[in-house]
Image (cartoon, rainbow, N blue to C red):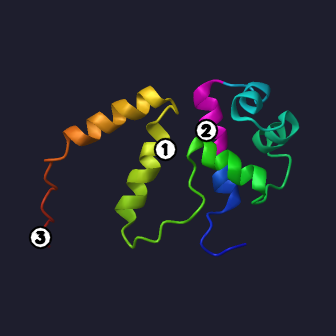
């Protein structure tokens, strides 16, 4: 496995969360995301040892799941990205609403660091 890739189990968990947020069963998820129903069922059930295959990479690209680790050196940036993945319902409308909320906070100043 390439050292800069997230663990495949984390990626599969993100796919499961995405499908659950959509309210889809495995057949609906497969149909809506353009992959085979058996493949989707295996991914969602966890009864297969997932690997970084072309279908998995394609699926992640379609739903916006990041495969690479973010080596920013700033854990807060990674936490922000994960939080956005957690709260976003996957729809374009919700993406626009979240974008507007974030842009409205542009002038927000961070709390000063506490002195020890």
Q: Which residues are magenta?
A: 15-23
For the N terminus, the quadrant is bottom right
Picture quarter containing residue 84?
top left
Name the spot of residue 112 as percent of width and height, x first.
Answer: 12, 61
Residue occupying image coordinates x 68% and y 74%:
2
Q: CA distance from mark 1 to mark 3?
A: 33 Å
Q: According to the image, label 2 marks what residue? A: 17
Picture quarter containing residue 74?
bottom left
Question: In this image, 97 relative to 86: left or right?
Answer: left
Discs 1, 2 touching: Cβ within 8 Å: yes
Q: According to the image, label 1 marks what residue? A: 85
Q: According to the image, label 3 marks what residue? A: 115
Residue occupying image coordinates x 76% and y 40%:
44
Name the spot of residue 57 as percent of width and height, x first.
Answer: 69, 54
Does the image show residue 13? Answer: no
Q: Mark 1 vs mark 2: which is more N-terminal?
A: 2
Q: CA distance from mark 1 to mark 2?
A: 9 Å
Q: Mark 2 vs mark 3: which is more N-terminal?
A: 2
Q: Secondary structure at mark 3?
A: loop
Residue occupying image coordinates x 83% and y 37%:
36
Depicted 25 relative to depicted 114: above or below: above
Q: 13 or 96: which is nearer to us?
A: 96
Name the spot of residue 5 as percent of width and height, x first.
Answer: 62, 67
């Amino acid at each position: 496995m390439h050292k800069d890739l997230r663990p495949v189990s984390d990626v599969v968990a993100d796919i499961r969360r995405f499908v659950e947020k959509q309210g889809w069963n495995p057949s609906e998820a497969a149909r809506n995301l353009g992959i085979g129903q058996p493949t989707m069922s295996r991914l969602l059930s966890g009864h297969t040892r997932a690997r970084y295959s072309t279908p998995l990479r394609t699926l992640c690209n379609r739903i916006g799941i990041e495969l690479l680790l973010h080596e920013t050196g700033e854990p807060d940036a990674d936490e922000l990205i994960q939080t956005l993945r957690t709260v976003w319902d996957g729809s374009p409308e919700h993406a626009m609403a979240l974008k507007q909320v974030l842009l409205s906070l542009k002038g927000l100043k961070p709390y000063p660091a506490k002195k020890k």
